[in-house]
């Protein structure tokens, strides 16, 4: 794979801003999920509703941003002089880490037999959420090598021990299982599939467009009644649902930043916005719009909305140079994995020590919505402190 000479070398602040905003909204809606008596438009739509809310857009937005970052990540490593072996080792480690963390998170919330476990499910969950921090923390260069090894390998040992301390509810067997992959696990699979293809085609725009079409077709076939796929092909087709959004992000990123264009209307991007919406609403009549089912209409309409949002941020920040406002969201953009994990750490810690921080009054209705917003803001400031002390997860 060759270095993309036309690809911007500097950091794209509009991508960081979109990532930060997405993470902030993700923390808000995750906290809001535990609040009672909130409007339907502030919750996930039911599986068969044929509709979506802004809450159903958060996960697609994160996948889209993952895709937008892929060309820059590969180009940076090629410019740095990394060999294919180094690049692939890093890619596989990142995907595997996301899948592992995702599976542990899923098992912490469901599927266990508490009566047969040596430790309480709450303590198990606390350790499952906490251990990724010492394992994947980006330690500063002057950090003690010995202490770093103790923290990283100690965290790995704890995760392995948690596997054998887990007792399944239905079968009584020992060990966790991928009931589903969790949000992070789904991101890991979509990332892995997309970057493997990206590497094989050397990041060519036309080839990524073809892959985007293949993802939509595979997703559609997997949801079409009467289409019987082999198990292995059904597994891949299922993950093509989310690879659609990653590949869409890659395509839009290449259209913006891998071409010598002036600061004017980007007609190819406008064309893809129209195409995303047109194809999405066309497929809606056959599959409906559903995040839970992962329908092609949901992925394509989400890709269209994400592209519109990014185009606006690009115009505002890269063209008009209005960037000051985005500083509020940047702590989340700089440390997305940690800010996603941290609320779970807090939740399970409170369960372990039986601590109730928030009165019941703030667990429903308007007070609950306001609390969710305040909690999200608090998390941003916590991340600002963590970033200052070099506590940053880096896969």
Image (cartoon, rainbow, N blue to C red):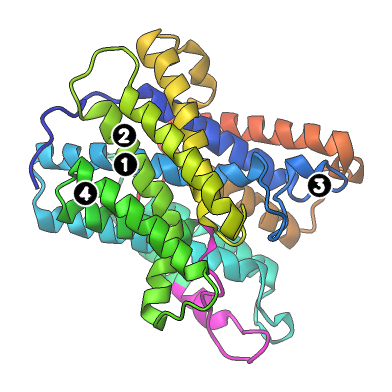
Name the front one of labels 1 and 4: 4
Neighbour class for label 1 at 10 Å: few (<14), some, many (≥20)?
many
Asked if the residue under mark 1 is in contact with the one under mark 2, i.e. CB atoms within 8 Å, the reply is yes
> Residue at (29%, 54%) from the top-left corner?
211
Task: Please name whichever residue, 234 or 268, is drawn nearer the observer in this view of the structure.
Answer: 268
| Residue 53 percent across, percent down from the top left | 67, 42
- Measure how far apart labels 3 and 1 are at the Cα level: 35 Å
Name the front one of labels 3 and 2: 2
Q: Give the label on residue 207, or none.
A: 4
Which residue, as the protein is rendered here, is positioned at the far right?
361
Neighbour class for label 4 at 10 Å: few (<14), some, many (≥20)?
some
Asked if the residue under mark 4 is in contact with the one under mark 1, i.e. CB atoms within 8 Å, the reply is no
| Residue 60 percent across, percent down from the top left | 51, 46
- Measure how far apart labels 1 and 4 are at the Cα level: 11 Å
Query: Residue beneath label 1, please?
Result: 250
- Measure how far apart labels 4 and 2 are at the Cα level: 14 Å
Regarding residue 334, the answer to whether it shows in the image is no
Sequence-earlier tag: 1 or 4: 4
- Measure how far apart labels 2 and 1 are at the Cα level: 5 Å
Secondary structure, mark 4, is: helix
Is 139 positioned to the left or the right of 74 in the image? right
Identify the main secondary structure in magenta.
loop
Query: Residue beneath label 3, please?
Result: 35
Name the front one of labels 3 and 4: 4
Regarding residue 49, the answer to whether it shows in the image is yes
Secondary structure, mark 2, is: helix
181 inside magenta stretch: yes
Name the front one of labels 4 and 2: 4
* Residue range (magenta): 160-183
Query: Residue beneath label 2, please?
Result: 253
């Amino acid at each position: 794979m060759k270095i993309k000479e036309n690809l911007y070398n500097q950091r794209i602040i509009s991508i960081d801003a979109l990532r930060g905003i997405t993470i902030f909204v993700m923390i808000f809606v995750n906290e809001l999920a535990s609040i009672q008596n909130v409007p339907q438009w502030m919750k996930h739509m039911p599986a068969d509703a044929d509709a979506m809310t802004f809450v159903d857009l958060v996960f697609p937005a994160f996948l889209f941003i993952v895709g937008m970052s892929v060309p820059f990540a590969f180009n940076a490593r090629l410019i740095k002089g990394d060999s294919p072996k180094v690049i692939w080792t890093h890619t596989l480690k990142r995907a595997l880490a996301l899948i592992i963390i995702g599976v542990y998170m899923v098992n912490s919330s469901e599927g266990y037999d508490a009566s047969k476990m040596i430790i309480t499910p709450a303590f198990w969950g606390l350790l499952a959420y906490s251990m990724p921090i010492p394992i994947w923390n980006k330690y500063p260069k002057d950090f003690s090598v010995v202490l770093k090894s103790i923290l990283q390998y100690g965290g790995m040992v704890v995760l392995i021990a948690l596997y054998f301390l887990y007792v399944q509810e239905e079968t009584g067997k020992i060990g966790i299982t991928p009931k589903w992959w969790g949000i992070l696990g789904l991101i890991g699979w979509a990332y892995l599939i997309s970057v493997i293809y990206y590497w094989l085609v050397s990041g060519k725009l036309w080839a990524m467009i073809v892959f985007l079409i293949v993802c939509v077709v595979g997703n559609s076939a997997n949801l079409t009644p009467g289409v019987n796929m082999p198990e292995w092909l059904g597994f891949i087709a299922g993950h093509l649902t989310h690879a659609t959004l990653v590949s869409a992000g890659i395509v839009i990123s290449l259209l913006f930043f891998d071409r010598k264009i002036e600061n004017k209307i980007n007609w190819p991007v406008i064309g893809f916005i129209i195409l995303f919406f047109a194809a999405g609403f066309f497929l809606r009549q056959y599959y409906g719009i559903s995040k839970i089912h992962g329908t092609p209409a949901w992925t394509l309409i989400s890709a269209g909305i994400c592209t519109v949002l990014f185009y606006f941020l690009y115009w505002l920040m890269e063209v008009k140079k209005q960037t000051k406002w985005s500083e509020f969201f940047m702590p989340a953009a700089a440390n997305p994995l940690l800010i996603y994990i941290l609320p779970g750490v807090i939740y399970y810690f409170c369960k372990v020590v039986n601590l109730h921080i928030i009165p019941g009054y703030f667990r429903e209705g308007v007070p609950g919505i306001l609390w969710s917003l305040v909690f999200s803001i608090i998390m941003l400031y916590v991340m600002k402190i963590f970033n200052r002390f070099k506590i940053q997860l880096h896969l």
